[in-house]
Image (cartoon, rainbow, N blue to C red):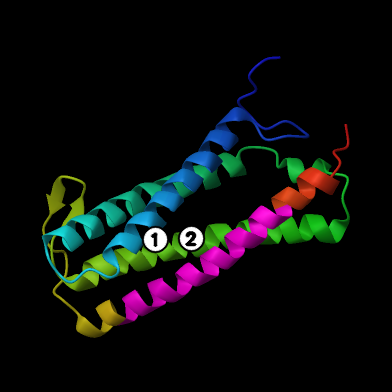
Amino acid sequence: MSLQLKNSFSQYGFVARVLHWSSVILLISIVYYSGLFEDLKDGDERQGLVHLHSSLGLIFLSLMFSRLIWRYVNFNPIHSYNIKNWQKFAAVLLHRTVYFVVILQCVIGLMILLAAGGSIHFFEFEMGALLERHEFLHSFSIEVHSLISYLIYSMLALHIFAGIYHQIFGVLDE
């Protein structure tokens, strides 16, 4: 059995799997750290967790763009699955929606950082403020960011359910 880097007609390749599971681990980490700072009052501990959350978010955004590029240059095995056409359509639609929404979430997160008017941190690196504080945009972005997170949780639950369903009932044409 050889290591197949690219997707084949019937299954995802090594690179797609690494990108997928790396983004899953990163997303879980991002959610975890957001839960830690959500209830803290302003202070050094909260700021440190916010910086970590946003740094991981920037990496996640880069990873999602890498996944999009890799997906674009590879065959999508879903087309070989022996499932109903509506299921293929639903799977493709869900994947595209997940990509769109999580990338939008990252962009909204960047808007929060920019509208805050303070320095932008990427781990230990600090870049000065790019914009002056904009209170309405900052507050609005935080609210949208929070609402989108619930949408992401719902879509990921659906994605997990569909993956389990496919593993149990799905059959590949080979």
Check disc 1 and report its element: helix, strand or loop: helix
Residue 157 as seen in the image, left or right of residue 32: right
Judge by depth and name the residue closer to the eye, 93 or 69: 93
Q: Which residue lies furthest to the bottom in this view?
A: 136
Discs 1, 2 touching: Cβ within 8 Å: yes
Q: Identify the amino acid type marked 2.
A: Val
Q: Which residue carries the number 1 mark?
A: 106
Q: How far separated are the C-alphas under marks 1 and 2?
A: 6 Å
59 shown above or below 91:
above
Residue 122 as seen in the image, left or right of residue 14: left
* Magenta-span inclusion, residue 111: no
x and y percent of residue 35 in the render?
A: 35, 63
Q: Which residue is drawn at 33% across and 75% down?
A: 142
Checking the image for residue 150, the label placed there is none
Q: Which residue carries the number 2 mark?
A: 102
* Magenta-span inclusion, residue 157: yes
Q: Which residue is drawn at 16% across and 58% down?
A: 45
Q: Which residue is drawn at 88% across and 37% down?
A: 173
Corner quadrant of residue 13: top right
Q: Identify the amino acid type marked 1.
A: Cys
Q: What stretch is highlighted in magenta?
A: 140-162
* Quadrant in which the N terminus is drawn: top right
x and y percent of residue 72 in the render?
A: 60, 44
Judge by depth and name the residue closer to the eye, 44 or 107: 44
x and y percent of residue 134 in the render?
A: 19, 80
60 shown above or below 101:
above
Q: Which residue is drawn at 40% across and 77% down?
A: 144
